[in-house]
């Protein structure tokens, strides 16, 4: 069997062609008188062996065995010939099937001589299949076939091509390809836009073209674009002369549109929802669909959604805000709804408009002004998962849908408001609600003006898919917006809004969360005013980011402030804080997985600076040490004994007590400032040293430089906090201290000393109150303590009175009974001063009071 796989094997002559078949000449008596070489190959006889012998020598049985084949042969020869299939005998005796045609020749009347053309039957059946194939290509093939001559004029087409051209033969023969189709163009990349140029290149080079996509409007469907997959190859005769080019064209419009929809869906999956910003998401759907799917797009969101609020329940008429208006087709009217304008702004739709119908029915709604003017179609087709979820919603939705259909029937003709677009050349409108998790976020409206096609069912399904993706992204952005607003509010309430006024230090600070979008994290800092003009300095680092970390940070900051108000030493404060963190972890529900955001693993550094003594006491829990820079610019890390992170428990904390020269710079920072995945802590500290060693810069300038040097590309993988303080010393003219004996006469002496000092400071009007406070505190010390008593006055932003003794008994503020002889002094003192309290040292305690200066 011939395969017809290359030029050498193709033979259209057929097995019974006289140029290739066995030819036998018979006289009027059917005696062989002529014998061809092909006959010798078929039957095995030499001419000298067969000439003069009867035909019966070759033919055994002339009964026809393949009637369809015989009929085919008869149709291919003239009326003077007849064909039949029979059994022949080879010279070696074996029998085989042949097909033969007998044709009468001109001769004397009676029985004229004949010529017999014969061939083996099997090759003939193969030839018959080839003939059937050619007939099928010409009459039944779904592929359009056309032949163009060397001038690219059409010379022949098959039945499929003729159906597409939809003209008489005389009207298309001799036409060029651009004369057959309206507005055609090549849409495959890498080819000339004109089809004639492609065909001319095939004729000139002989290189075939396959899979070329051509878009045009065929005569049988002049209102719609069709797409064909085309192949072109050069035609040549047996001698190599170019005859023209053959065109194979298969209409793949449906397949191509499906591929385009799939590509659009894939593109939407990549490009919609790339950020957690609702307006950006709305812009992204417009960028995806224009101009491939629509000429104009508007996106409206429910008003509260933009603020992160929960949308209203179904049934309430939502207030809409236009967030996107976009036109992308160059052929779209300039005033098409969706043209760029100032957005967002409130938008309202007229009753019966497709947009309100869509919101009410919770389904896509189409309007086609060309095929059915004034008609509104509610289309409940949805994607499977979304549809199943929405079908499970409250049954009230059914009534809403029916009401929407009623409104569509009576109000569609009125949907001609400024947002409807029909007066702007929009012929097709598709409104789709943006629904996610059973809630309507808004709606998107697709409009067509340049594209003449209405939205079909496949495009409705695509629009629902795009709307679903967009709605989920909008809902995620809404939830993020709400969480971010909550986190920011939480952190604004938890971080210091303003630092306390005090004279001990100058302060500058910076906070840089790693999550810039959310804007919150777990690092914190604080400056706490303490008794005796001292100041507490805190930095801490909570594991994690976001709301949970901010909440944990807030709890710890509040706890630190409360413990600091008790005037605890830094090591004791961290020990108490560690116990509270452990207790919080133990208070979780039984069997719950321990959460890092409950404070476990928190790092913290707490320092207290006293401007009177210029001493700084600090302790740390899993935190980098503080750094100091003296007035000469020498940088060093304070050798604060390391402690475990909070929540580990069982290990004590130790403090470092160091004297700082006036004007020293203290830097308290979290690990995220000096360390990241690309830099170790030593390298970060070295960079910080280079910044802080500059004594010329202000604290604010040093903070900015530190961030630019250590975080040049913005926040890293961890939050960063920096607290810079420059220390001050209270002068000798602001502090006075006396040592008193523990005997009653010391009370009178204390009053005299205080009165004289107040007079020197010009605070005579505070003399009465201060004298009363000093008398009561010194008297209590004499009665309830031992050893020498120390009295100290500090004049700063307020007047501080401190009485220290060797006792550790805490004073008790209480209401005395009517028959009590004592116990009212401390109560009276508390009513006359702004603040008072007790702080303990290793050698005793100090009771202090604070009064506002006049």
Image (spheres, rainbow, N blue to C red):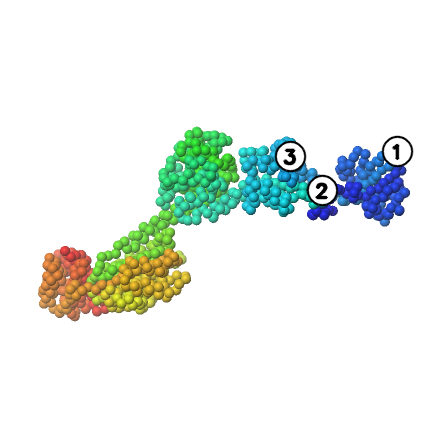
The quadrant where residue 744 appears: bottom left
Q: Nearer the viewer, residue 382 or 27?
A: 27
Alpha carbons under labels 3 and 1: distance apart: 48 Å
Answer whether residue 302 is visible to the viewer in this image.
no
Q: Earlier in the sequence, mark 3 or mark 2?
A: 2
Q: Return the residue at label 3.
A: 173
Q: Return the residue at label 1.
A: 108
Percent position (x, y) of residue 404? 43, 33
Answer whether residue 384 is visible to the viewer in this image.
yes
Which quadrant, please, contains the C terminus? Answer: bottom left
Alpha carbons under labels 2 and 1: distance apart: 40 Å
Question: Could you classify mark 2 by the number of other residues whose Cα lies within 10 Å: few (under 14), some (14-19), or many (20 or more)?
Answer: some
Q: Earlier in the sequence, mark 3 or mark 1?
A: 1
Name the residue rendered at 39%, 64% in the picture: 680
Q: Is residue 820 left or right of residue 315?
A: left
Percent position (x, y) of residue 492? 30, 52
Alpha carbons under labels 3 and 2: distance apart: 27 Å
Secondary structure at badge 3 equals loop
């Amino acid at each position: 069997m011939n395969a017809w796989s290359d030029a050498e094997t193709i033979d259209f002559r057929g097995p019974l062609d006289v140029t290739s078949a066995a030819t036998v000449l018979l006289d009027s008596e059917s005696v062989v008188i002529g014998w061809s070489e092909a006959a010798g190959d078929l039957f095995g006889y030499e001419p000298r062996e067969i000439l003069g012998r009867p035909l019966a020598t070759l033919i055994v049985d002339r009964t026809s065995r393949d009637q369809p084949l015989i009929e085919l042969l008869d149709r291919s020869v003239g009326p003077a010939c007849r064909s039949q299939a029979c059994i022949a005998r080879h010279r070696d005796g074996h029998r085989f099937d042949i097909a033969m045609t007998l044709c009468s020749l001109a001769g004397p009347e009676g029985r004229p001589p004949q010529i017999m053309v014969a061939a083996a039957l099997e090759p003939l059946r193969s030839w018959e299949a080839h003939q059937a194939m050619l007939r099928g290509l010409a009459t039944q093939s779904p592929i359009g076939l056309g032949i163009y001559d060397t001038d690219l004029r059409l010379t022949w087409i098959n039945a499929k091509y003729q159906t597409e051209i939809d003209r008489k033969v005389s009207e298309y023969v001799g036409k060029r390809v651009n004369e057959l189709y309206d507005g055609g163009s090549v849409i495959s990349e890498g080819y000339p836009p004109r089809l004639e140029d492609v065909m001319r290149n095939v004729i000139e080079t002989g290189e075939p073209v396959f899979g070329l996509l051509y878009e045009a409007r065929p005569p049988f469907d002049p209102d719609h674009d069709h797409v064909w997959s085309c192949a072109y190859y050069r035609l040549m005769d047996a001698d190599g002369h170019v005859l023209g080019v053959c065109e194979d064209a298969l209409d793949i419009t449906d397949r191509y549109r499906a591929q385009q929809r799939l590509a659009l869906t894939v593109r939407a999956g990549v490009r919609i929802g790339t950020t957690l910003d609702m307006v950006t998401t709305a812009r992204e759907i417009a960028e995806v669909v224009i101009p491939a799917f629509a000429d104009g797009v508007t996106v409206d969101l429910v008003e509260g959604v933009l603020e992160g609020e929960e949308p209203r329940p179904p049934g309430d008429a939502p207030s809409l805000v236009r967030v996107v208006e976009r036109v992308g087709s160059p052929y779209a009217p300039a005033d098409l709804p969706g043209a760029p304008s100032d957005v967002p702004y409130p938008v309202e739709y007229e009753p019966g408009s497709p947009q309100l119908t869509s919101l009410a029915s919770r389904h896509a709604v189409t309007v086609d002004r060309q095929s059915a003017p004034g008609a509104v179609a509610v289309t409940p087709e949805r994607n499977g998962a979304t549809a199943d979820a929405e079908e499970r919603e409250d049954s009230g939705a059914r009534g809403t849908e029916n009401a929407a259909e009623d409104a569509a029937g009576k109000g569609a003709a009125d949907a001609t408001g400024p947002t409807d677009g029909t007066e702007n050349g929009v012929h097709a409108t598709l409104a789709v609600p943006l629904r996610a998790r059973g809630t309507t976020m808004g709606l998107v409206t697709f409009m067509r003006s340049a594209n003449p096609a209405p939205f079909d069912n496949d495009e409705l399904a695509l629009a629902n898919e795009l709307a679903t993706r967009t709605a989920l992204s909008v809902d995620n952005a809404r939830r993020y917006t709400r969480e971010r607003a909550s986190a920011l509010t939480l952190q604004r309430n938890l971080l210091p809004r303003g630092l306390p006024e005090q004279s001990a230090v100058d302060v500058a600070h910076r906070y840089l969360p790693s999550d810039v979008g959310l804007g919150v994290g777990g690092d914190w800092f604080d400056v706490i005013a303490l008794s005796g003009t001292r100041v507490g300095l805190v930095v801490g680092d909570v594991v994690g980011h976001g709301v949970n970390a901010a909440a944990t940070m807030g709890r710890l900051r509040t706890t630190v402030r409360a413990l600091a108000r008790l005037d605890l030493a830094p090591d004791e404060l961290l020990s108490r804080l560690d116990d509270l963190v452990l207790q919080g972890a133990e208070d979780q529900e039984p069997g719950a997985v321990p959460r890092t955001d409950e404070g476990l693993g928190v790092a913290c550094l707490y320092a207290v600076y006293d401007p009177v003594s210029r001493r700084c006491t600090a302790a740390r829990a899993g935190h980098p040490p503080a750094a100091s820079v003296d007035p000469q610019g020498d940088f060093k890390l304070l050798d604060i004994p390391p402690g475990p992170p909070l929540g580990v428990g069982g290990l004590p904390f130790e403090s470092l007590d160091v004297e700082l020269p006036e004007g020293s710079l203290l830097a308290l920072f979290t690990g995220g400032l000096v360390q990241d995945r690309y830099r170790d802590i030593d390298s970060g500290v070295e960079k910080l040293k280079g910044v802080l060693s500059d004594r010329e810069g202000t604290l604010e300038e040093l903070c900015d430089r530190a961030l630019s040097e250590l975080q040049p590309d913005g926040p890293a993988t961890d939050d960063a906090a920096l607290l810079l303080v420059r220390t001050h010393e209270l002068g000798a003219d602001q502090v006075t201290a006396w040592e008193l004996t523990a005997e009653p006469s010391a009370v009178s002496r204390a009053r005299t000393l205080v009165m004289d000092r107040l007079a020197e400071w010009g605070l005579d009007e505070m003399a009465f109150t201060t004298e009363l406070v000093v008398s009561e505190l010194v008297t209590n010390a004499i009665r309830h303590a031992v050893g020498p008593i120390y009295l100290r006055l500090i004049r700063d932003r307020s007047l501080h009175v401190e009485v220290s003794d060797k006792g550790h008994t805490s004073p008790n503020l209480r209401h005395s009974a009517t028959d009590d002889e004592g116990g009212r002094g401390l109560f009276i003192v508390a009513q006359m001063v702004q603040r008072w309290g007790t702080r303990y040292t290793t050698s005793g305690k100090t009771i202090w009071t604070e009064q506002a200066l006049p």
